[in-house]
Image (cartoon, coloured by chain):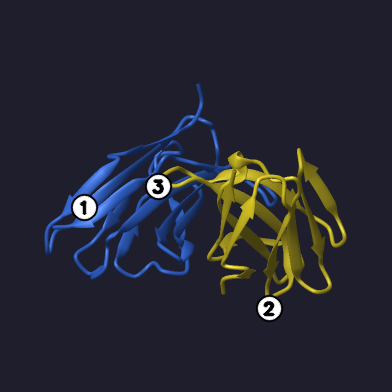
Amino acid sequence: DGGITQSPKYLFRKEGQNVTLSCEQNLNHDAMYWYRQDPGQGLRLIYYSQIVNDFQKGDIAEGYSVSREKKESFPLTVTSAQKNPTAFYLCASTPWGPNEKLFFGSGTQLSVL
Amino acid sequence: QQPVQSPQAVILREGEDAVINCSSSKALYSVHWYRQKHGEAPVFLMILLKGGEQKGHEKISASFNEKKQQSSLYLTASQLSYSGTYFCGTERKGYSGGSNYKLTFGKGTLLTVNP
């Protein structure tokens, strides 16, 4: 079955540590997105990529980095510069173009030790 | 800029109706609606593409007033399964009048349906 796989489901970060969240899709979608969700804040866009080897900053990109070396994969690194990383992270994908619905992964809960 | 949703929360008894509103200060290309159960990924409900468009999904429907940059989600004869957080997502118009391809979400409306 086609879908989006996020791993791990739960992740813990120590102070000063970089961590990477995985997102893989087999839907043959061109565009991929990372959203951060905090209680009461909705979903806020971190980064998005419309084609391989290209990506754009979203509304809250500081302290995060991404890569898009393959169409299927869009990993997100939470760097030590992100001082408040505890949140639920959602990866999504769509076919290229406007008016396309988002297909979401099941999310990763990141917590700070 | 996030679209503004209202109300923030609503509690219903099974069978009652509810309206959730979504408004933006920017010109909109389209409006999306999603529902999220606690701890799960959001699930797509519908997209509204044109000003004045209305769509229906079971007993859930929505309208889009492009001129006012507003959308409303209507839930009629609510069921227990309708409980969750509802998000509107907006695609803004780019310089050419088309979409800017970024979906920006509101903070959500928590809907609780009790027996």
Chain A colour as displayed: blue
Which residue in the protein does label 3 denote? A68
Please tell me which residue lies in front, B76 or A20.
B76
Residue drawn at (31%, 62%) of the image? A64
B52 shown above or below B80: below
Image location of residue B30, percent across then percent down: 73, 59
Mark toward the start of the polypeptide (1 vs 3): 1
User: How much space separates mark 1 and mark 3, taking CA atoms?
Assistant: 17 Å
Which residue in the protein does label 2 denote? B25
Q: Which chain is yellow?
A: B
Please tell me which residue lies in front, B52 or A21.
B52
SS of the residue under disc 1: strand
Residue A18 in view in this figure: yes
| Discs 2/3, front | 2
**Tag 1: Cα neighbours inside 10 Å, few (<14), some, or many (≥20)?**
some
In the rendered image, the residue lying farthest to the top is A1
SS of the residue under disc 3: loop
Discs 2 and 1 carry the same chain letter = no
Q: Chain of mark 2?
A: B
Residue drawn at (49%, 52%) of the image? A49
Type of residue at label 3?
A: Arg
